[in-house]
Amino acid sequence: MLNIPTQSFPAPSSQQRVSPSGQSGRSKVALKPGHSLMDWIRFSKSGKDLTGLRGRLIEVTQEELQKHNTRDDCWTCIRGMVYNVTPYMDYHPGGEEELMKAAGIDGTDLFDQVHRWVNYESMLKECLVGRMATKATTAIKAIVPPPPLTGLAPPTSAAPPRDKDSTPRYDWFQTDVTVNVVIYAKRKIPSSGCTVVDLEAGVLRLEVLLGKMSYMIHLCLTEDVEGTVSVHTAFSVGKIQLSIRKQSKGKWTSLGQPLEFHNTFLRKKDRAPYYRDCVLVSKTEVNHNTHVFRLQLPRGTVMHVPVGKHVYLKALIQDTEVVRPYTPVDQTMAAASLRSSQDSDLYLMIKVYPDGVFTQHLNSLQPGDHVSVSGPEGTFTARPLRDVTYLYLLAAGTGFTPMARLIHLVLQDTDSIRNIRLLFFNRREVDILWRCELDQLAANNERFQVDYVLSEPCESWTGRRGRVDESMLQDFLNRPDGSRCYVCVCGPSAFTELTVGLLKQQGFSDEELHAFQG
C-alpha cells in the first residue's frame, strides 16, 4: 500500500506580505455561475472519480508527470504529492492561466508565492493521484549551531550557518510554588510583542517571533501546574520570563520531556501555524454587512498580535477544512488608547459575503461557539517608519483593517511622522467602515487626515468619486522637499496590484512601500 505522508498545512506563511519586487498577489477572475468554493466542495464530495484512476494511488515518475500538461489533462506536484487538477480548473479563483503555469511540473514554488496559506490538502483531497517516485520531500531542519570545523575545507551547506552566539537559548528555575522559564533572545525585542504561549493539559508551547525567525520551546511538563501563565519581557535586553504556578508544592527534578521542534530556531515561514480553540464572545455590527467578532483566547494562552500582523481562522465546513486570514483591530477606534493590557481578546472586523463560504459560517456562530485561531503571521514591521515624516495609507473596503491599529501606533508612539493621510475607497457611503470614529479622530488630531472615495456615490455625495488612478494619487500624495514618505496599501488583489504599479510610476521605491496582500 502506498504510504501517504502527513503534511503540515495550511502552510506557514503570510497572505499579507510583500514580495521582494513589491508586487502584489494574483488577481482573481470572475468564475462561472455554479463554480464557487461551496460548489467545488459539493462536487468533490459527489463520489465522481476526479483522478481518472478509479480510486488507486500510484507513484508518479518525472516523465509521467510531464505528459499531463494540457488544459484537459493537467497534473501538478505540490510538496512531493501529485494532483490531477483538471476538474478544479473552472473553480480556481485565480483562473485557468495561473493554474496552467504548474501543469506537468513541480508547482510547489509557484504555489508558495501566492497560496501558501491555502489548505490545499483538504481542497484537493479527491484529486490526489499519488506520490512522486523520484523526489522525496525534504524535511525542514532546525537551525542549530554548527559543530567546530576539524579541517580547512569550507562547509558544504548551501546556506551559511548562523552564528552560534545569535541563537536564542533558555534556562529555568523554580521555587516551592512556581516554575519559571527564561528565554535569552540575544537581541532587542520589539515592544509590539512577539511571544505566544499555549499551556494545555500539561503541555507547554512557547514561540518567540524574532523578525523572520521563530524560536520555540515545546515540553510536556514534569508535574501538574495551574492553567494560567504570566509573561514578563525586558525588551531592551532581550529577556523573556514565563512563570507558572505548581499545583503542589515541591521540587521538580526536571522541567519536562521535549516534544517536536523543542528548542529549535527556524525561519517563521518554515513553521506550520499552530491553532488554539477560541470562544466567540460577541458580534458587534459595524454596518449593513460587517461585524466585529470578539474572540476569547483559552485560559492558558498568552498572545498579543503585533500591529500589521494577521491570524488565520480555520473551520471544518462540509468535511472540508477552510482557512481564511484576518487582521485584528481594536474594539473601536476610540478604544485603542484606552485598551487595558489585561484585555487579551481578539477583535476581528469581518465582512459577511452573501456567497462567502467561510464568512457565512462565521456569521452563523453564536456566543459560546468555538473557532480555531492561529498565532500571528505576516511580514509587516514598523521599523521603516522610524525615519518617515509622511505616512500615506491607501485602503479599499476591509483592506482598512491593518490600517486601523497602524494609525494609532503612529499617533501614539511615532512623533517624527508629521502627517498621516488615509485615502479610503468604498462603493457606497453606507459601506464606509468606522466613518464616525475616523472623522472624530481627524477632528481631534491635526496630524491625521482622512479622505473617502466612492465608486458608486449618491447624487448628494460631495467627496471624491471614482476609482484609484494616476491623477487621484498625484493629487493625494504630497512629497515636500526633504520629506521621507512611506505608503501602505491594502485591499482586493486587483486594487493592490494596480495601486502599487501607479505608485512606482510616481517614483516610489520598494523600500517606500508595503502592500498587505489580500
Image (cartoon, rainbow, N blue to C red):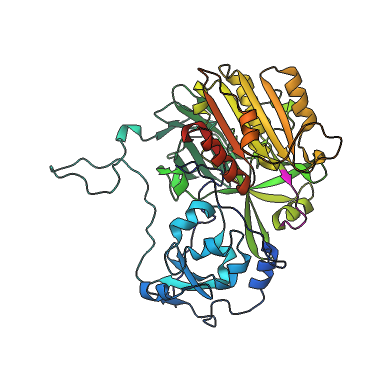
Decide if residue 257 is in sight here.
yes
User: Residue 331 location in percent, x, y?
Assistant: 73, 33
User: Residue 190 location in percent, x, y?
Assistant: 50, 28
Magenta span covers which residues? Answer: 350-356
* Residue in the image at 43% along x and 45% along y: 262
**Up/down of 188 relative to 516, above or below:** above
**Up/down of 513 relative to 130, above or below:** above
Please name the predominant secondary structure of the magenta segment in the image. Answer: loop
Q: Is residue 352 magenta?
A: yes
Q: Nearer the viewer, residue 66 or 205?
A: 66
Query: Which quadrant holds residue 36?
Result: bottom right
User: Residue 238 location in percent, x, y?
Assistant: 44, 26
Residue farthest right in this picture: 460
Query: Which quadrant holds residue 465?
Result: top right
Q: Is residue 201 magenta?
A: no
Judged left or right of residue 346, residue 457 is right
